[in-house]
Amino acid sequence: MNRPEPAPLPAGEALLSRATPSRIGELEVLRTIAVIMVLLEHVSGNLVFWPSHLAKQIQQSGAWTGVDLFFAISGFVIARSLLPKLDETRDVRAFMRTSVEFWIRRAWRLWPSAWFWLAAPLVLCLTFNRSGVYGGFKGNWEMAVAGILNLANFHFAAVFMRAPPGTAFVQWSLSLEEQFYMLLPFAAFMLRRRLPYLMGIILLYAFFMHTPYSPLAIVTRSGAVAAGVLLAIWSFHPTYQDCAPVFLARRRLARIAVLAGGIAALVTLAGSQCPVVPFFLGPVAIIAAMLVWAGSYGEGYLWRPGWPRTIMEILAARTYSLYLVHIPVYFAMHEIWFRRYGQATPTPRQAVAYLFGAVAALAVVAELNHRILERPLREYGKILARHYAARA
């Protein structure tokens, strides 16, 4: 009896099936490193409110470039999945079907948790705010509206150093990504093979931002996302495999040097105490993309398999929750400390207990958000997207 021929893959799936797996362990490691950089960046002034030389030094470093590393990972992963499907669309109807399915998945993946942590500060600033750390209702309300409209980045730039930005100010980066990924399908469909030129222009523009400390430049920087998209486009070309850094697989010290050196370059370039070049947003995007390139093959060129990588991958699944909840948790610890001790400078023992308590609270709240909101609704979004695609 002859076996039936396998059904042909849907549009774009043939090309996508030749790509690397949807989750690459080494990129998950980079994702964890990126969120740790951001958590450390926000310690001074948000968690540690007393004079601390170490916290101040971390804040003055360029640890905030962890966001750019996030952007590069995001650009690569999403473009590698989405662009092959769009490449097979030949009419507006097929384009809209593919794009809407993508937007449904992304909305249910991100928006429920984001909206919850836009709403939570509205309650906290009224009920748990004796120290005033959560700010006023007005600032949190404005940020909530801006976040729901995916305009949090522009709102943050508008109020920067003028008015309190609201507890959920970190959601500016989510708005920037949503703006980018709302437009990317249209650009891919209309430009086709010319899409790399547009991404190259966006990346090149980052090199000419001579005022990188201006709020608007910071919250609209898309160079790292564009670099990740370019890397994804290249990953479908034979030269991508030809250029694999295979020498790193056999040299542990070289892997450590590449990873540690790349992170050190990011924080040094963007550090306020030692500005290397005045237009560092472009180099930051390139370095972030190079780290993603080294890890994108999934062959251990950046971090070999083992229990440390397993732990990092577990943390990576919770990076979105950690990013959303860390400022509200930092503020909660500040409020608890204020109610217990006032604003007195803590003793070393008190400070250690306070910081360990913050880490524990952060882990618990992030895990609850991941289990209750993020993961179940992400899976529900996948179901809705499949149902939509089937009906369409």
Image (cartoon, rainbow, N blue to C red):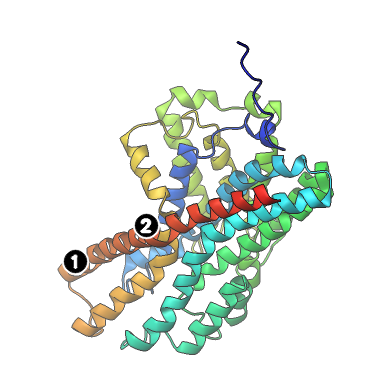
Residue lying farthest left?
A: 349
- Locate residue 113, reporting x and y percent: 46, 65
Residue lying farthest front?
A: 1
Is 210 in front, or is 22? 22
- Locate residue 144, reporting x and y percent: 53, 78
Q: Residue at x 65, y 65 (%)?
A: 220
Q: Are marks 2 and 1 in contact (CB under 8 Å)?
A: no
Q: Residue at x 71, y 51 (%)?
A: 392
Mark 2 or mark 1, whichever is nearer to me = 2
Is 347 in front, or is 302? 302
Residue topped by disc 1: 353
Q: Quadrant of residue 213?
A: bottom right
Above or below: residue 299 compared with residue 223: above
In the image: residue 312, left or right of residue 340: right
Residue topped by disc 2: 371
Q: Quadrant of the N terminus?
A: top right
Total numbered labels: 2
Is 14 in front, or is 361? 14
In the image: residue 136, left or right of residue 156: left
In the image: residue 250, left or right of residue 50: right
In the image: residue 225, left or right of residue 359: right
Amino acid type of the residue that numbered disc 2 sits on in the rendered structure? Arg
- Whether residue 160 appears in this view of the structure is no
Q: Secondary structure at mark 2?
A: helix
Q: CA distance from mark 2 to mark 1?
A: 27 Å
- Whether residue 61 appears in this view of the structure is yes
Amino acid type of the residue that numbered disc 1 sits on in the rendered structure? Ala
- Locate residue 86, reporting x and y percent: 74, 45
Q: Residues within 10 Å of mark 2 (few under 14, many from 20)?
A: some
